[in-house]
Image: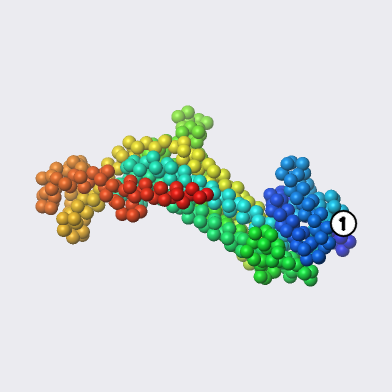
């Protein structure tokens, strides 16, 4: 029997009840809902809305239920409509008339909004620590490759030499921003407590909303009760933040897939993170990286789903919003799994330094350095650019590189050339000299890694 059953409301069609139920999805809110109910019961006692002893009985029993659920001594009854109905029914089964008082001055509308916010706070904290973990794992891998030369690309065309450390640290920055976005989102979730908004218009009972807000760690209570029960901005924000995380994960996954192809051969994913083919015995496929790339679609879908659900909803609560939780939870579970598996996959990925170097030696990645050499000799950059272009054309015709292009030939293009050009176009030197803050020089990247590690030590 639903908690709202009475003589006025006839019984529901069985299929409709099943359709209306959300307990399968919202069971995970159980601890958050208990915490919300404990704060509410304390407030009811403090304001003498119900007798203090009764409030204490409610608080104690809810505490016991919390422990029993954790120990597996209390099972959720999945035939209830939702987790809120289950908890009230269980409390009433245990405390009789006193149990029924827990819902004084409260509606499931402000209850669910509160539980969702409390749950979201823990989820945000967990996701934030996982993002930090990924940033740390990337930094640690980078530290092993400070001098591993690889081609840097634009348009997926070889552009300038960088190091593998520099490439990985770009992702570190992305995950650090992800972390800070999650931390910001948490602040906003905790800004306003919806509890006390009741169904939509508060209540005639003298609730002390400041008390419950403080008890639950919120900065304040929602200043408008209609907004309190109908706001799901925090879920949208969280979904947007998680979608951005998935953009980053999918970009890195895509690069790992490309690098592990035989065409690139920059990395080798160990068997622990690849799978085989049922027909081609030789295959080792980067399935885990592909799934990391593919899961982004699911999370973007969840964001789109909630945006679509919320769009055009009139104030205040509407049942559509029940659906929102399921999408949010799916995204949280997906992103959590991806953030957990990513560092493990990176750990089981061997870097083939030789292949990265060989690739860097083809494609005139040091052409800009040759032009810069002429600039240092006082030649205007645009002229230096043209001269280098002429040299490259000759290199191509003669099957030469800037490293083995003879000095007499250099000199034919410009009298400014002398033997120091060879040091200038040496790939290692090209990287070492890109010593500008934020650049790939091993010294700079090491500083970056150290700064990130120091920052993350606090978490
Ligand atoms: N299961 C509902 C939800 O998750 C709880 C709120 C029900 N409120 C209502 N007015 N029917 O949204």
Q: Can you give x and y, in whole percent of width and height, for residue 75 in the image?
A: 76, 44
Left or right: where does residue 106 sit relative to residue 447? right
Q: Are there few (<14), some (14-19), or many (20+) residues within 10 Å of tag 1?
A: few
Left or right: where does residue 237 sit relative to residue 63? left
Left or right: where does residue 100 sit relative to residue 254? right
Q: Is residue 201 above or below residue 56?
A: below
At 69% from the left and 53% from the top, the residue drawn is 32
Q: Quadrant of residue 204?
A: bottom right
Q: Can you give x and y, in whole percent of width and height, for residue 65 in the image?
A: 77, 48
Q: Quadrant of residue 398?
A: top left
User: Which residue position is annotated with label 1?
Assistant: 97
Quick one: 309 or 234, which is closer to the camera? 234
Secondary element at image label 1: helix
At 73% from the left and 53% from the top, the residue drawn is 34
Q: Can you give x and y, in whole percent of width and height, for residue 133 in the image?
A: 51, 46
At 20% from the left and 42% from the top, the residue drawn is 403
At 30% from the left and 49% from the top, the residue drawn is 160
């Amino acid at each position: 029997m639903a908690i709202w059953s009475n003589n006025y409301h006839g019984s529901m069609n069985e299929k409709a009840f099943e359709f209306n139920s959300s307990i399968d999805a919202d069971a995970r809110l159980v601890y958050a809902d208990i915490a919300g109910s404990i704060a509410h019961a304390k407030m009811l006692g403090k304001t003498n809305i119900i007798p203090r002893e009764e409030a204490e009985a409610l608080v104690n029993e809810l505490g016991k239920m919390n422990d029993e659920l954790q120990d597996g001594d209390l099972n959720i009854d999945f035939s209830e409509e939702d987790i809120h109905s289950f908890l009230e029914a269980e409390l009433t089964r245990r405390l009789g008339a006193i149990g029924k008082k827990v819902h004084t001055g409260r509606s499931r509308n402000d209850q669910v909004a509160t539980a969702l916010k409390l749950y979201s706070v823990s989820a945000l904290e967990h996701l934030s620590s996982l993002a930090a973990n990924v940033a740390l794992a990337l930094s640690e891998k980078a530290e092993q490759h400070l001098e591993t030369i690889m081609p840097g690309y634009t348009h997926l065309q070889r552009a300038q030499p960088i190091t593998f450390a520099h490439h990985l640290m770009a992702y570190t920055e992305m995950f650090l921003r992800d972390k800070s976005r999650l931390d910001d989102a948490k602040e906003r979730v905790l800004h306003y407590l919806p509890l006390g908004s009741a169904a939509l218009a508060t209540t005639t009972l003298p609730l002390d909303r400041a008390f419950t807000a403080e008890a639950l760690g919120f900065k304040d209570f929602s200043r408008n009760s209609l907004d309190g029960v109908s706001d799901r901005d925090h879920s949208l924000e969280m979904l947007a933040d998680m979608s951005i995380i998935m953009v980053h994960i999918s970009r890195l996954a895509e690069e790992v897939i490309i690098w592990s192809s035989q065409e690139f051969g920059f990395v080798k994913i160990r068997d622990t993170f690849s799978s085989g083919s049922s027909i081609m015995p030789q295959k080792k496929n980067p399935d885990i990286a592909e799934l990391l790339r593919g899961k982004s679609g699911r999370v973007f879908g969840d964001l789109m789903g909630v945006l679509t659900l919320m769009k055009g909803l009139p104030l205040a609560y509407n049942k559509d919003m029940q659906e929102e939780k399921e999408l949010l939870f799916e995204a949280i579970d997906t992103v959590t799994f991806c953030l957990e598996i990513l560092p493990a996959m990176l750990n089981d990925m061997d870097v083939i330094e030789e292949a990265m170097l060989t690739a860097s030696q083809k494609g005139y990645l040091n052409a800009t350095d040759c032009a810069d050499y002429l600039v240092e000799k006082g030649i205007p950059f645009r002229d230096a650019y043209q001269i280098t272009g002429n040299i490259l054309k000759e290199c191509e015709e003669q099957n030469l590189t800037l490293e083995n292009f003879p000095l007499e030939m250099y000199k034919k293009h410009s009298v400014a050339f002398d033997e120091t050009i060879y040091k200038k176009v040496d790939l290692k030197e090209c990287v070492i000299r890109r010593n500008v803050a934020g650049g790939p020089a091993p010294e700079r990247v090491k500083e970056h890694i150290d700064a990130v590690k120091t920052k993350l030590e606090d978490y």
